[in-house]
Image: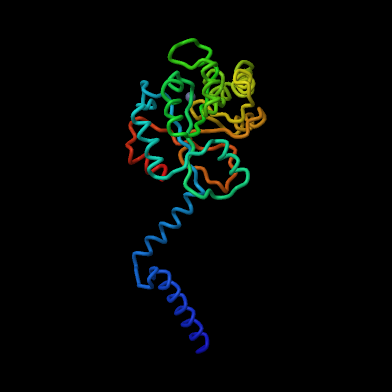
Amino acid sequence: MKKNIIILLVTLGLSLAAALFLLLDDAGVFSPGRMVWLHKDREVRSRLLSIPILLYHNIDGKGPFAIDAAVLREHFQLFRDRGIRVISLRELVRQLENPAPFDDRVIVITFDDGYGTMHSKLLPLVREFGYPVTLFVYADIISVKSSRNLTWEKARKLDRQGIDIQAHSISHADLTELYRINDQESRKRLYEELYLARRLIGLRMNKKIDFYAFPYGRYNLAIMDMARKAGYRRVFSTDYGSNIISRDNFCLRRQHIKSSYTIDFIDSLVR
Ligand SMILES: [Zn+2]
């Protein structure tokens, strides 16, 4: 009995000594503030495994998701000032397929739809900062001839200059609604919005399309499975949160950026 108490006391003593040792600073001086640093270290390590994908829409347009060009520039500058590395979606997917933490904090930047401002405003900014960006386009926005929208020629130019074009359906239909209706017409359309979109955008862009962003971010498990069968390597929602590298998710989350967000909030999303 007495022996057990001695073992217990020795164990407690050793644990306390180990804890105190962790709180010594580099000069060996006792420093309780070091606990905060240890906590920070853990935070940094978990951030290396947790990758935010940002989602933007139009630039200088109308509505809650259109961002001012000047504000977008501030975001881009913030990422640089914070030492955050902007990687391509393809690089993230490669890392997901062979899971390992990144060496530094990374983010991915994506845009949806296919507005003309992708050429007039995003391209110059992307060139200036050297950030790889992915743009998910839906076919109809480009097929409708309007100065507000991209043309296929401009989309190909973006693709050659560091803006990776990927698929965002044919007509921007809500896929969950088509799935719910479940008649002959809606089943045909669901097939087109997923499978035909990959074929058509691939033909127009003269490349293989690997990624698909769900219109309005809406999906269900059956739709996810159809997307997999249509040949997509990864699909993208607008579900809240980051992507954990150790989980090899087929459906990745994206953080929707609204024009009302402050720069401090953007900072809190990426740091
Ligand atoms: Zn969209």
Q: Residue at coordinates 38% horizontally, 31% vertically from top-left? A: 72
The location of residue 151, given as percent across then percent down, is: 51, 15
Color style of the picture:
rainbow
Confirm whether residue 128 shows in the render: yes
Q: Residue at coordinates 54% horizontally, 37% vertically from top-left? A: 252
Q: Quadrant of residue 180?
A: top right
Q: Residue at coordinates 53% horizontally, 13% vertically from top-left? A: 143
Describe residue 70's horizontal placement relative to residue 158 as left or right.
left
Q: Quadrant of residue 192?
A: top right
The location of residue 70, given as percent across then percent down, is: 34, 29
From the viewer's perspective, is residue 76 above or below residue 22?
above
Question: In this view, which residue lies farthest toward the bottom?
Answer: 2
Q: Residue at coordinates 54% horizontally, 50% vertically from top-left? A: 101
Q: Quadrant of residue 221?
A: top right
The location of residue 21, given as percent across then percent down, is: 42, 73
Confirm whether residue 187 shows in the render: no
Question: In this view, which residue lies farthest toward the front?
Answer: 128
Count of numbered badges drawn on the protein = 0
- Nearest the viewer among 241 and 180 is 241
- Nearest the viewer among 127 and 193 is 127
The location of residue 127, given as percent across then percent down, is: 46, 29
From the viewer's perspective, is residue 124 above or below residue 87?
above
